[in-house]
Image (tube, rainbow, N blue to C red):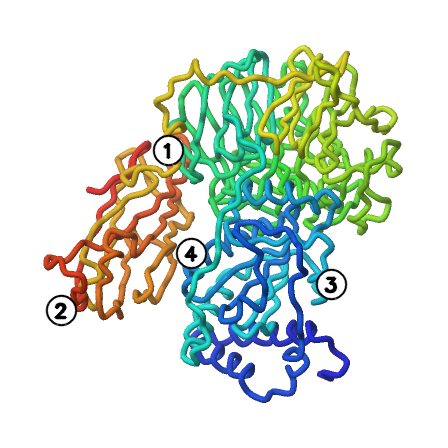
Amino acid sequence: MDNDELSAIDIVTFVTEELQQNYLSNRDNKAKVFEEFLGRWEANDNTIAKVKSLNFEFDADLDWFNVSRPLTLAGLHGKIVVLDFFTYCCINCMHVLPELRALEERFPVESGLVVVGVHSPKFENERTAANILSAALRYGIKHPIVNDSKSALWRALSIRCWPSLLVLSPSGLPMLLLMGEGHGEFLRDFVGAALPYFDSQQKINFSSLPLQLSTDLLPASNLRFPAKIAMLYDQYAIADAGNNRVIVVTNCGVVKYKIGGFEAGFVDGTLNTARFNNPQGVAFLNKNTLIVADTDNHALRQISLDKGVVETLAGTGTQGNERTGGKLGPLQPLSSPWDVSVFRTRDMDMSFHLDELNVPEKTIVLIAMAGTHQIWGYFPEGIIWWKFRKFEPRCCVSLIGNGLEENRNNSYPQNAAFAQPSGLAMSSDYLYIADSESSSIRKASMVDGKVMPLVGGDRNPLNLFAFGDEDGKLYNAKLQHPLGVAYNNIDRKLYVADTYNHKIKVVDTETNIISTLSIKNKDGSTLVLREPSGLCVDADRKRLLVADTNNHRIHIIDLTTYTAEPFILDFKQISSTSETDAPRALSKDSALQLVKKISLLQHRSCNINFVMKLSSELKYTLEAPQKWAIKIISPGLEIKQSNGLLTDGKCSLQVKNSLENIRTEAIGQSDLAIEFSLSLCDTKSCLMKKFMVYIVSERPVEDSPLQPAISRDNALDVDIGIHINQSNISFY
């Protein structure tokens, strides 16, 4: 490598790749790998001299969020800093957020780590501070964010893609550049090695930062960041994404059901105890059955209103990266499903039927799989479909798109490509798709899967920056990150939520011409939207419901006069005793969070044995992994293995304690939290059970300010039994 020909950021990229290769090939001795790498930054290593000469800083007068005053990189010296270069529209950037959240929980600011989001916008709309603030609230980002609206730091450091994680040493030198998603484990291990290394050199600053969570510029109503809307007969379903729930209302706005709760989770069960995580898409299968794209749980869920039950149809609760699929039900990992639509057709099995009209139609649930840039299908009954391909009952499989992030139309569905498809609408023969990152609306034939352009985007399939705000035909029209579509089968018009242009537009599907609707309030003023992301035509096809997402409200628009009025929701006529109305901090003895007190800090080591006991109607799903993972661990406690699989419903943790004294202020706090993700079946269906067990230290017998914590050399053995049935999880 000739360093004279490489930029500083090229050198960082090279040493990062070199370190990751060594890390993967020396997993049993990764501590030595990290120590040798970190030593390079203290030695006179000429290969990284150009990196050491870098000098960069945040511009002055930028908007900051989640801090009480602006930060500077110079002021962060003494911390290991992770700069997350992101833009809030990017699905890959969204996937990185849980990885960063887990990193921050393991290494809080006072331990010497700080994560700073550097928002570097793609779209014009993303330069606005209010929109970034709404995104931060929507995604639950709690670390500091700076609005680098002109991408000054991006350009100064020659960052190339979203997301990019730049890791700085305590002296402010770039040590690592991690591009794309999926670096969570590596980053956790690196920070776990870097903090004690630099601490041994007295270079870590353990002080706090002026953190202060930013609040929304507008108060939320009973809705919070509403997403998609679905209709059947006289009722609507609304994905109340910010409240992690789905609500079902009458056409007069009376709330009939609230399913889910404020706190995010991945739990099947009754309508009150079930939990979702940022649900975006909803569709009615019939009047009593709803399908939900449970986006941040990476799952397809089903709500049975008549039975009062929520169950998981597909998805494991964690992000997958498959581009093909084909597994059954909850065995099939998904990646950020963003919308769903229902299509019905007959078997294409070439069989002769005396009366073709009496051949029953079968259901296909179509999924906008934003995370893999594809359209997937879930087949409740199984079917023989395109090219006489047989789909087994309950399988979930990729149908259209090769997984590349492109705006590529093609006669063959597997050769087409999308760029973060986020909205779906069905006509009789076509699936209309809001392809957000290509800023286009496209359609796929339900006869053979052929993908065709409708409006927006560019003829060049690789150009994902052809966005704007122009009415017109086909590629002459320009949109900006559209998220929602709704089809009116009476006049064959397609309504579009042109999200980042804050407009509602309509496409004549016969001519491929799009035009902007001029919508007025009843007083004659112009309706002002903020990032609308969902819409739905009512049963009479005369009105349009619009989810005004960042204004936390629903509008209903007369399609004759284009006059809007608020769609007022009446929550008073539904029982207020559901868990949906409980405080945001769930009770510790709920099915989601179990707490066990043991004298953990008073022993040199502790063996904790978890034993699951299933009720008689349940059993473990064959071939499905039964997972556990450590989510919280206090400083001074050590566990060799942070995640794994249950064996015969059991797992054991060996916890070592290096603390010399008990900090009495820590007594009663969670020292250890383990999350269990179980795939279970009964005689009729499969379901997921996901819950946390918190281990809390008991107060010592001698209640003194400082009590010897390591009072005995013998190990503590604790058995924790957990009983699981259809609707409840408890200790036994």
Q: For residue 180, what is the image quadrant? A: bottom right
How far apart marks 4 and 1 lie (CA) works out to 22 Å
Which residue is tagged 4? 105
Q: CA distance from mark 1 to mark 3?
A: 44 Å
Report the residue at 39% width, 27% height from top.
Answer: 581
Vertical position of residue 324 compared to residue 9: above or below:
above
Residue 235 in the image: x percent, y percent? 55, 15
Circle 1 crowding by C-alpha within 10 Å: few under 14, some 14–19, many from 20: few
Find residue 414 and report its image quarter. top right
Q: Which residue is mark 1?
A: 583
| Amino acid type, residue under disc 2 in the picture | Arg
Residue that label 3 marks:
155
Q: Secondary structure at mark 2?
A: loop
Q: CA distance from mark 1 to mark 2?
A: 41 Å
For label 2, the residue is 712
Residue 42 appears in the figure: yes
Q: CA distance from mark 2 to mark 4?
A: 30 Å
Which of discs 1 and 2 lies nearer the camera? The answer is 1
Residue at image position (21%, 50%) is 597
Amino acid type of the residue tagged 3 in the rendering: Arg
Residue 350 in percent (x, y) is at 69, 28
Mark found first going from the N terminus, 2 or 4:
4
Q: Is residue 67 left or right of residue 540?
A: left
Local crowd size for mark 2, using a 10 Å CA cut-off: few (<14), some (14–19), many (≥20): few
Q: Residue at x 67, y 14 (%)?
A: 357
